[in-house]
Image: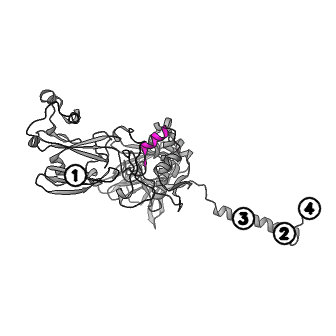
Amino acid sequence: MLPYLPGGNGLSSLKKCILTVLFIFFLAFMNAKPCIAREIPVELVWNFKDAGWLGVSIEAGNYRLIVVNEKTGGKLTVPTKETACTSGSSFECGWGGFAPIFRLEDKPFEIWRGAEIELRTLDSNGVFKVQTPDGKAVRYRGSLLLSWKGDHWSLINLIDQEEYLKGVVPIEMSNAWAQDGLEALKAQAVAARTYLVKKLQTASQITDYPDYDQAYLGKEVEGQASKAIAATKGEILVDNQTRLPIDALYSSHNGGFTEKAENVWSNRDPHFSSHPDPFSMGMGGAADQWRFIISADELGKTFQLDPIQEIQLDKYPSGRVKKVRMTDLKGKSKEIPGRTFVQAFYPFGHPIHSEAFLGSLFEVQKVPGQAETRGPYMPGQPSQWKLLIEPQLINRDAAIHSGPRLDRVLSSSLGVREFPSSEGIFIFWGRGWGHGVGMSQWGAYHMAQLGYSYREILNYYYDNTDLAQQ
C-alpha cells in the first residue's frame, strides 16, 4: 500500500515527488563538471619543423588512417579512403620536387593533392612513431594530423591532456628526480598543466618546442614522473581572487634570485615577485654558475661596432641586467636591452655547459690586450686569469710550446683564431639559466629533497594563488 501524501491522491503525489527528485538530480548533473578526458592539439616543431620527408609507423593499439580530400569550414570532409591500421602498419609522406607525395605500406608513391591525413586512434593504447631520413625518431600517444604547407609537412599530435603531461614533466625536469624529489615533480606537473590550460584559453594549439612553450617529447621520455602527474590529476594554480588560471611561468634555475614578470616582459603580474632564493644556490652545475669569454673585436662585430673598449651594466635589484651599454675604440656607444644581449650568444639547440651564456644575471670583467698592457700574458697573474686556460680554447701543442695565448680567443662558442688580436677580451660571469620568473626547477628539487611538499613549493614561487581542480 502506498503511503498517503497530502495534496491529492497518493499515486499522483508520489509521481510529483519522484519527478521533483529527478529534476533536482538533472539540474545537479547539468551543473557538474564532466569527468572526461580532454584532447589537446600539440604542434610538433621541435624535431620535425620544416620536415619534407616523414615515415609514420604504428607501434601499439588500433588506428584508422583517413585520407581527407577536402576541408570545409575547418572541418574534415570527403574522406577518399579509410584504412584500418594495427601494430606494424606504416606510411610515408614526402616531397617529389614539384608536389607532395604519399604511400601506404610498400605501395608506389602517389602525388598528394588532399587536405589532410588523419591517423586516428581507436583506443587508449595507441602509440605511433614519427621518423625522418636523418635519424630523428620520436614515439607519441594519441592521434596524428598531417597536412602539406607548401614546402613541408605540418604535424599535430592530438592527445589527452594528462597523457600530454607525461611527455612534458620528465623533459622539463627528470624522471631520476622521482627518487628523492617527487614533490618537485608534482609541483612541475601542476605548473605545466596550468600553463597549458592558460595557453589554450587564447591559442588554438600549443607547440612542443621549449623556446616557445613547454618541452614535449611524447612517450619517448615517459617514466617515474608519471606518478607525480597521477597524484595531482586535474590540479591547476588559480588566482586567489578571480579563481582563474594563472600564467604559471618557470625556468630551469633563477641564479638564486626570483624576478618580477614586468622586468622581463614589461607586463605586471601579481603572481610573481623578486626575492632571494637560497634553495637554488649551489644546485644545477652549469646552470648554477657559468662564464662566457669573448674578444673585444668579436663582441663589437656582433653589435655592429668596432672593438669594444668599455661595458657598463644597468641592473634591476635582483642583479639581472636591464641594459648593456658598450663603447668601442672610436668612442661610439650603443645600449642594448639585457635579454637582447643574452640572446645574441645563447646556445639555442645546443647542450648546456659552463662555457655558455645562459641568462641575464651576470657581471663583466675586462682582460686588457697587448695593445693596452704593452706586454704578453705572464705566469703569476691573479687567479681569475688562470681560470681562462681551457683545453677547448687553445691548441694543445701550442700551449705546450708557447703557453696560453688569451689574445687568440674569439669566444667560448667560436674557439680560437689563427692570429692573435691585441684589443683584449671580456669575461661574463653569470648565475642561472632562463628568465628567473616563477618556479626555479632546481630550487624546487632542492626544496623537495629538504622535505617540502609540492603545495609548499608552489606557494614559495607563486604569489596570491590557490590550488584548484580544473
* Mark 3 crowdedness (10 Å alpha carbons): few <14, some 14-19, many ≥20: few
Percent coordinates x, y for residue 248 in the rendering: 45, 54
> Whole-Å distance between the Cαs marked 2 and 1?
86 Å
Give the foreground label among 2 and 1.
1
**Residue kind at label 2, given as amino acid type:** Ser
> Whole-Å distance between the Cαs marked 3 and 2?
17 Å
Nearer-the-camera pick, 424 or 32: 424
> Whole-Å distance between the Cαs marked 1 and 3?
70 Å
> Whole-Å distance between the Cαs marked 2 and 4?
14 Å
- Residue named by callout 1: 312
* Mark 1 crowdedness (10 Å alpha carbons): few <14, some 14-19, many ≥20: few
**Residue kind at label 3, given as amino acid type:** Ile
- Residue named by callout 3: 24
> Mark 1 vs mark 3: which is more N-terminal?
3
> Mark 3 vs mark 4: which is more N-terminal?
4
In the rendered structure, does residue 452 fall within the stretch colored magenta? yes
> Mark 3 vs mark 2: which is more N-terminal?
2
Stretch in magenta: 436-453
Nearer-the-camera pick, 93 or 190: 190
- Residue named by callout 4: 1
